[in-house]
């Protein structure tokens, strides 16, 4: 198998980002709340590493990162025994969405207090450029990028005791 090594990079620069948010809190009654937050985040120079295969495919662009044994039997290049994968400022991403929460507090007299809550996130856009010069790809709805996340919960408090039940959903 092929050995890969992660390397530090003294030329690494800090990631840069811009973000914008707009929030709204409504209390239609003394016992209910509606929270809406819209947001947009753009990150540049995200730190990541290329895969060993990407470095091998472009070995001439990454001098000293592919380690080879001496050539044998008249081969031009020796067998690869290690690929060094330095951290680089590679990626750029743009993400936007809306977070929301609806909650209701209900007094149950001697039975305690019940709080019902629905909260979630709806992603509106998620675009990723994995490396400078490469195309920007829409990753929304794919692996690790769900369009929607939702949590429904109920919390009952009676004196010093409290119990909760919650369920999560994502798609």
Image (cartoon, rainbow, N blue to C red):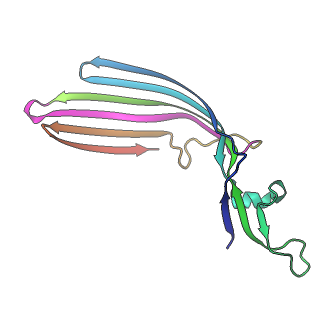
Magenta stretch bounds: 108-132
Residues 126 and 68: in front is 68
Residue at the spot x=67%, y=43% of the render?
A: 91
**Predominant secondary structure in magenta?**
strand
Residue at the spot x=86%, y=71% of the render?
A: 77
Q: Is residue 100 above or below residue 55?
A: above
Residue 135 picture location, percent across and down: 73, 41
Q: Is residue 141 left or right of residue 3?
A: left
Q: Is residue 111 magenta?
A: yes
Residue at the spot x=37%, y=34% of the render?
A: 119
Residues 170 and 84: in front is 84
Q: Is residue 23 magenta?
A: no
Residue at the spot x=42%, y=25% of the render?
A: 36
Locate the N terminus and report the quarter of the image it occupies.
bottom right
Q: Residue furthest front?
A: 10
Q: Is residue 147 above or below residue 30?
A: below
Residue 68 picture location, percent across and down: 79, 70
Q: How many marks?
A: 0
Residues 118 and 10: in front is 10
Residue 144 picture location, percent across and down: 53, 48
Quadrant of residue 3 in the image? bottom right
Residue 5 picture location, percent across and down: 67, 63
């Amino acid at each position: 198998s092929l050995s890969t090594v992660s390397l530090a990079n003294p030329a690494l620069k800090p990631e840069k980002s811009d973000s914008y948010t707009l929030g709204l809190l409504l209390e239609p009654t003394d016992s209910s709340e509606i929270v809406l937050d819209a947001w947009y985040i753009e990150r540049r120079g995200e730190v990541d590493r290329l895969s060993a295969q990407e470095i091998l495919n472009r070995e001439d662009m990454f001098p000293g990162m592919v380690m080879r044994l001496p050539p044998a039997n008249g081969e031009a290049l020796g067998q690869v025994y290690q690929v060094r994968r330095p951290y680089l400022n590679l990626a750029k991403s743009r993400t936007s969405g809306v977070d929301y929460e609806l909650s209701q507090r209900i007094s149950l007299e001697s039975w305690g207090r019940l709080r019902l809550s629905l909260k979630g996130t709806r992603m509106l856009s998620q675009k990723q450029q994995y490396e400078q010069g490469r195309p920007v790809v829409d990753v929304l709805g794919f692996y690790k990028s769900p369009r929607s996340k939702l949590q429904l919960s109920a919390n009952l408090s009676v004196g010093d005791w409290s119990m909760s039940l919650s369920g999560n959903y994502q798609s």
